Image (spheres, rainbow, N blue to C red):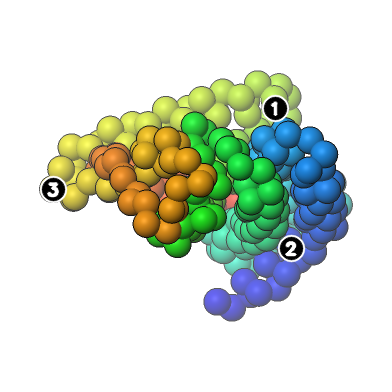
Amino acid sequence: MRGFGQLFKKDLESISLMTVILGIGILLWDTYFYTRIGEWKAEVAIIPTMLPFGVIMFWLVLQAIQVYRHEWQTGGIHLLLALPQPGSKIALAKLAAVLTSFTLNLLVATFGFVWVLRAGSLHSGGVRLFNVAMEAFFQSREASSWLIKIALWSAFAYWLIGVGTVVIFQLVYNCSRLTARLRFLVGLASFFVIQWLIGLCGSIGYYVFPRVPDLVIRVPIDTLSRLDSAYGMAQAPVQTAKILINSGILLGNALGMVLVFLVTGYLLQNVLEV
């Protein structure tokens, strides 16, 4: 895509420093709690390693806004809107830059969590997290495969939530730039309107896509929580339960997100003035 590479590189450079700082901070945080294994109760060392996932989401909201706010602070918005580039390309470059940074830090946080979880589970028997005997996952090959699947699907779901968060807050910020006064209130009002719009799209999707098969998620149930660590884990079956999610609602929400992104591009190209 012509011109996209330069836009993406510029936006990525504007948030690269904070990306590196956050990634290093996550690694240092997880390393500290890794060194506490054996000195503290295993759960006490493991649970704090989930905190970076919340920090990353908070950071994501800030960067989704900052990547646009930076243009107004530096005056680069004058050149940006004067470029012969469609607003959708400008919006896509900024979305891609934030999501690239988000993905890198999500990988770091996931690695750190699994690293500490495995060390704590193998060091101390009877470690329980979410009412599940975690050491069972690392002592059974079948259970380990489930752990990997759960981790991948959880990370993907979290990533999709991150995508939606960036799309929403970037439109919120651009809506706030439509007025010179009461920008916070305008942004807050636009946030609730966007949420309503996406919810409406999800409701419409429920009726428009009734024949799309439901999304089926299989999760391990109480069997693993009852297993004794001395038992032969490699031979222990992993019982699962099915969770059904309506695909029509998901498709409707996805189309709503696309609509929100297109509105952002339209504002940049045709409405916003500097």
Amino acid type, callout 3: Arg
- Left or right side of 26 for 251: left
Mark 2, mark 3: which one is toward the viewer?
A: 3
- Left or right side of 77 for 185: left
Dot 2 surroundings within 10 Å: few (below 14), some, or many (20 or more)?
many
Residue linked to disc 3: 211
Dot 3 surroundings within 10 Å: few (below 14), some, or many (20 or more)?
few
Which residue is drawn at the image coordinates 37% and 44% (left, top)?
A: 220
How far from the left and from the top, in percent, is residue 104?
Answer: 67, 60
Please determine whether, in this image, residue 272 is positioned above or below residue 225. Answer: below
How far from the left and from the top, in percent, is residue 228?
Answer: 47, 41
**Is label 2 in a helix, a strand or a loop?**
helix
Residue, far bottom: 2
* Cα separation between marks 2 and 3: 41 Å
Residue, far left: 211
Residue linked to disc 1: 183
Residue, far front: 230
Which residue is drawn at the image coordinates 37% and 39% (left, top)?
A: 223
Choose between 238 and 77: the one closer to the eye.
Answer: 238
Choose between 203 and 126: the one closer to the eye.
Answer: 126
* Cα separation between marks 3 and 1: 43 Å
- For the N terminus, the quadrant is bottom right
* Cα separation between marks 2 and 1: 26 Å
Which residue is drawn at the image coordinates 68% and 67% (left, top)?
A: 8
Residue 19 lies in what quarter of the image?
bottom right
Q: Mark 1 and mark 3 in contact (Cβ < 8 Å)?
A: no
Amino acid type, callout 1: Arg
Residue linked to disc 2: 12
- Left or right side of 19 for 74: right
Q: Mark 1 and mark 2 in contact (Cβ < 8 Å)?
A: no
Mark 2, mark 1: which one is toward the viewer?
A: 2
Q: Is residue 21 visible?
A: yes
